[in-house]
Image (cartoon, grey):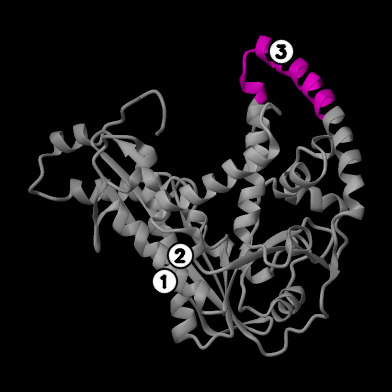
């Protein structure tokens, strides 16, 4: 008899199912009202935001590497916390993968099951980013590529690094969290200074456009949406949007952060603070976060600029580009290898698919460790079973 998979909704008690159906109807109505209001506000920005046509497709014989990484939340059993991560690259000659044009590396982290698991996961994130940066530099120095595309922005790893600076590590080459942070920072800076590396940002939740509206227009003109959603609604296909057209020619990615922080502070103070004072606070906040999270002044890092690219009907994505990179050349190439299903460069989709670790892999990796230890005659089996027993036997951890 063939079994049919039931929905998660049907697994709830009947009383809860009915309540959630009612809640869903109310939530849908509230969302509809919000969407209609925001859409009308966003439409009014068409005369403010400037879009430029993308250059013609020109893949030619460019040799380009695409780099991505993946890590899984650390898995816990009594006494041990285990995490895994991996990174890889694919080199394309024009729109075809080059011969022997793939490379992959992986790593693991084992810690005692004490302290905040967030710290362990942040370390895993940084170790994965470190592996990605090493792969990107390998491509620049050993694979004879014209440029490298990394997944994500250059210094996105910086968030909350200050919280693990003093953490003791048992990782080869790093004794404290600060050693790992500084190493990843310096590798990233080398990539940015090479003039042959760009970052593709798939998910951008900054509200930089609303921040600019606050500072230069009126609060009532704010859309209360992130930049990507705004541009998804009004940006034409085969066009690009550069923040320089809104913020000024000398603006950088730091201005995007400042304007977005301004919007956040305005919402926090609910209009009780003067906009100019909030702008000073936003600017100082961005400056201070780099000092504490990366141990450097943001102005000392390579100048980066951001722009959005839309190839097709799919939503646009954000490019982060060092000032020395030829924007036209990069945009022309990416247009030629676009995946219309996602709107992203197809090679980036491919390396993402290859490198993404399955959600259940951490458990299987931990199972393999346990199995190997069970075969070890020097370890008492009863002690080992207790050591690896689940904290909550009612649930799979």
Report, in whole angstroms, how far the alpha carbon at label 1 lies from the one at label 3: 51 Å
Q: In which quarter of the image is residue 171?
A: bottom left
118 over 259 or under it: above or below:
above
Mark 1 in CB contact with mark 3 (< 8 angstroms): no
Residue under numbered circle 3:
19
Q: Around disc 1, counting alpha carbons within 10 Å, would you say few (fewer than 14), some (14 to 19), or many (20 or more)?
A: some
In this image, 255 relative to 101: left or right?
right
At numbered mark 3, what does the secondary structure look like: helix, strand or loop? helix
Q: Which residue is drawn at 26% across and 35% down?
A: 114
Report, in whole angstroms, how far the alpha carbon at label 3 lies from the one at label 2: 44 Å
Q: Position of residue 334 (x, y in %)?
A: 71, 74
Residue under numbered circle 1:
134
Q: In which quarter of the image is residue 142?
A: bottom left
Q: Which residue is drawn at 62% across and 49% down?
A: 258
Would residue 362 be seen by someone viewing this image from the given angle?
A: no
**Between disc 3 and disc 2, whose residue precedes?**
3
For the C terminus, the quadrant is top left
Q: Around disc 3, counting alpha carbons within 10 Å, would you say few (fewer than 14), some (14 to 19), or many (20 or more)?
A: few
In this image, 238 relative to 162: left or right?
right
At numbered mark 2, what does the secondary structure look like: helix, strand or loop? strand
- Please name which of the two marks, 3 or 2, marks the residue nearer to the observer: 2
Mark 3 in CB contact with mark 2 (< 8 angstroms): no
Residue under numbered circle 2:
87
Q: Which residue is drawn at 25% across and 64% down?
A: 173
Q: Nearer the viewer, residue 65 or 235?
A: 235
């Amino acid at each position: 008899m063939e079994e049919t998979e039931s929905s998660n909704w049907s697994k709830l008690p009947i009383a809860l199912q009915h309540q959630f159906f009612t809640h869903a109807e109310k939530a849908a109505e509230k969302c509809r009202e919000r969407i209609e209001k925001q859409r009308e506000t966003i439409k009014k920005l068409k005369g403010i935001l400037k879009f430029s046509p993308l250059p013609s497709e020109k893949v030619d014989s460019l040799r380009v590497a695409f780099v991505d990484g993946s890590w899984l939340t650390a898995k816990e059993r009594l006494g041990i916390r285990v995490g895994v991560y991996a990174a890889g690259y694919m080199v394309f000659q024009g729109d075809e993968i080059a011969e022997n044009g793939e490379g992959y590396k992986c790593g693991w982290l084992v810690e005692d099951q004490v302290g905040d698991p967030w710290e362990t996961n942040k370390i895993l994130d940084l170790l994965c980013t470190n592996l990605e940066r090493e792969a990107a530099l390998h491509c620049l120095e050993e694979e004879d590529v014209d440029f490298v595309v990394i997944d994500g922005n250059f210094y996105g790893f910086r968030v909350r690094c200050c919280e693990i600076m003093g953490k003791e590590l048992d990782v080869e080459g790093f004794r404290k969290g600060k050693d790992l942070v500084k190493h990843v920072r310096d590798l990233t800076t080398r990539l940015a200074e090479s003039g042959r590396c760009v970052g593709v940002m798939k998910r951008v939740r900054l509200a930089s456009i609303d921040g600019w509206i606050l500072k230069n227009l009126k609060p009532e003109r704010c859309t209360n949406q992130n930049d990507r959603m705004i541009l998804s609604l009004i940006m034409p296909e085969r066009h690009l949007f550069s923040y320089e057209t809104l913020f000024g020619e000398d603006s950088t990615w730091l201005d995007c952060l400042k304007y977005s922080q301004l919007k956040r502070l305005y919402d926090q103070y609910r209009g009780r603070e003067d906009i100019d004072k909030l702008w000073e606070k936003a600017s100082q906040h961005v400056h201070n976060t780099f000092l504490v999270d990366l141990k450097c002044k943001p102005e000392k890092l390579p100048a980066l600029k951001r722009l959005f690219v839309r190839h097709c009907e799919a939503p646009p994505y954000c490019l982060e580009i060092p000032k020395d990179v030829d924007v036209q050349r990069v945009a022309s190439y990416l247009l030629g290898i676009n995946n219309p299903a996602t709107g992203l460069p197809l090679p980036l989709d491919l390396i993402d698919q290859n490198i993404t670790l399955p959600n259940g892999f951490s458990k299987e990796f931990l199972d393999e460790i346990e199995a190997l230890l069970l075969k070890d005659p020097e370890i008492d089996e009863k002690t080992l079973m207790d050591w690896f027993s689940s904290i909550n036997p009612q649930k799979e951890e």
